[in-house]
Amino acid sequence: MGIGGCIGLLAVGAILTFAVDWHMAGVNLDLVGVILMIVGVIGLASYVSILKRRRTQPPSPGAPVVDVEDNRYYK
């Protein structure tokens, strides 16, 4: 789920919780809205966490270069 999906879940949950004044038998729309908002926040947090992990910085240009194997044969 991307950022757009998470924000969409947050928006739909907020609309169901705060803006809808409609009652269904057997369904609490306020609770459904709160659950959607919680899922949206969890999805947004996990997406940002994964995105932060992907953006690793390359080593600085002044970092020493390590030569793994040096095969010099002197006669």
Image (spheres, rainbow, N blue to C red):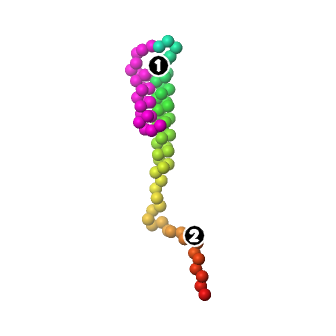
Residue 47 circle label: none
> SS class of the residue under badge 1?
helix
Q: Which residues are magenta?
A: 1-23
Q: Quadrant of the C terminus?
A: bottom right
**21 drawn magenta:** yes
Whole-angstrom CA distance, mark 2 to mark 1, is: 63 Å
Q: Which mark is residue 68?
A: 2
Q: Amino acid at mark 2?
A: Val
Q: Is residue 29 magenta?
A: no
Residue at 59%, 85% in the rendered image:
74
Principal secondary structure, stretch drawn in magenta: helix
Mark 2 vs 1: CB contact within 8 A: no
Count residues near mark 2 (Cα–Cα under 10 Å), then give few for <14, some for 14-19, many for 20+: few
Local crowd size for mark 1, using a 10 Å CA cut-off: few (<14), some (14–19), many (≥20): some
Residue that badge 1 annotates: 29
* Name of the residue lying farthest toward the left: 19
Numbered disc 2: secondary structure: loop
